[in-house]
Amino acid sequence: MSFKSKVVIVTGSSAGIGAAIAIAFSREGADVVITGRNRERLEKVAEECKVHQSPLVIRADLTNDRDVEEIVKKTIEKHGKIDILVNNAGIVQLSSLVDDTFIKAFDQVAQINLRAVIKMTNSVTPHIIATKGNIINISSVSGRQLYAYQYTVYGMLKASLDYFTQGAALELGKYGVRVNAVSPGPVETDIKPDSNPEYKRPTFPTVLQRYSTAEEIGDVVLFLASDKANGITGSNYTVDNGYLLVKS
Ligand code: NDP
């Protein structure tokens, strides 16, 4: 699957799933833009991309609209176009309705998991229309089935993201732009709620009795971003090792 001469922005590519997606696109010859807040981790991922193709590295906080606009501006300055956007950056916060954590978690998680996706999508739209490119949003099985009440904020925002994916696909389709989502089940990454350093990730049940690697999520993203998926828009691809079957 060659992405030679394709310009790809991957948000949250300083770690985990985003890093794996960025490295996979680089391996296939794409001009990748990697972005996150942590300079050290960004440099580490840049080194891994460089083995194949040098990435453009942009340090940015996606909760800041000006930073989002800078990502788009710098990408256009360097490459003159944008073909693919992967909205991957995301956080988790656990919360409860019997104390004051719910509203705090909602404000924090909504900023990055939903508002930043909308702002980023909005900012790239003219450029993606110009290239008839495509957008992939990294959602979660949590948007379809709640694991536990502490994950309500995370799950409801992923459900909203799924609606946003459909709405964007519906609106941008007439310009030849495809918009899809990938919903992973549990994946081996360092994701954890910032507010709780003691947090131990639960063991999530799966039919296949395994978790996916970040690279496996990358494989599905590359497929959806490629010409092999020309007929796919508004879809939400589940990669959960059968987690939803066990939970239902
Ligand atoms: P990680 O915690 O490993 O990575 C999160 C990435 O998001 C980092 O690169 C981080 O960069 C970036 N990020 C977070 N906040 C901001 C911000 N304010 N501005 C810019 N970048 C930010 O998470 P995962 O790789 O596990 O998760 C990636 C996506 O996959 C998320 O959307 C998550 O919801 C989803 N997902 C993950 C699952 C899992 O089991 N891991 C399961 C289902 C879905 P930095 O810290 O440098 O800013």
Image: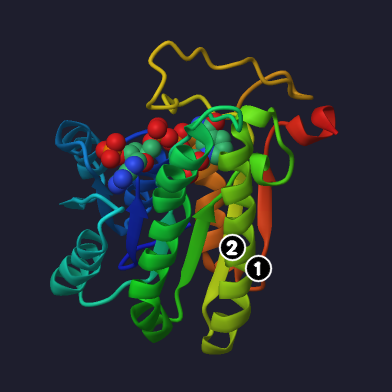
Q: Earlier in the sequence, mark 1 or mark 2?
A: 2
User: Would residue 174 be found to the left or right of residue 130 on screen?
Assistant: right
Residue for point 64% across, 52% down = 159
| Residue bearing mark 2 | 180
Please indicate whether residue 61 sits to the left or right of residue 157 in the image: left
Question: How dense is the environment of label 2, judged by Cα within 10 Å: few (below 14), some, or many (20 and up)?
Answer: many
Residue 88 visible at all: no
Quick check: which quadrant has ligand 1? top left
**Colour basis:** rainbow
Residue that label 1 marks: 234
Q: Quadrant of residue 205?
A: top right
Q: Is residue 75 left or right of residue 131?
A: left
Residue 85 x, y percent position in the rendering = 40, 63
Task: Point out the image quarter for the C terminus.
Answer: top right
Q: Which residue is pictured at 47% across the width and 56% down the height?
A: 114
- Amino acid identity at mark 1: Gly
Q: Secondary structure at mark 1?
A: loop
Q: Are marks 1 and 2 in contact (CB under 8 Å)?
A: yes
Give left or right: position of 198 versus 61. Answer: right
Q: Identify residue type, mark 2.
A: Asn
Q: How would you rate the neighbour count of disc 1 (Cα within 10 Å): few for under 14, some for 14-19, many for 20 or more? A: many
Residue at image location 34% in from the left, 80% down from the top: 127
Q: Nearer the viewer, residue 247 or 219?
A: 247
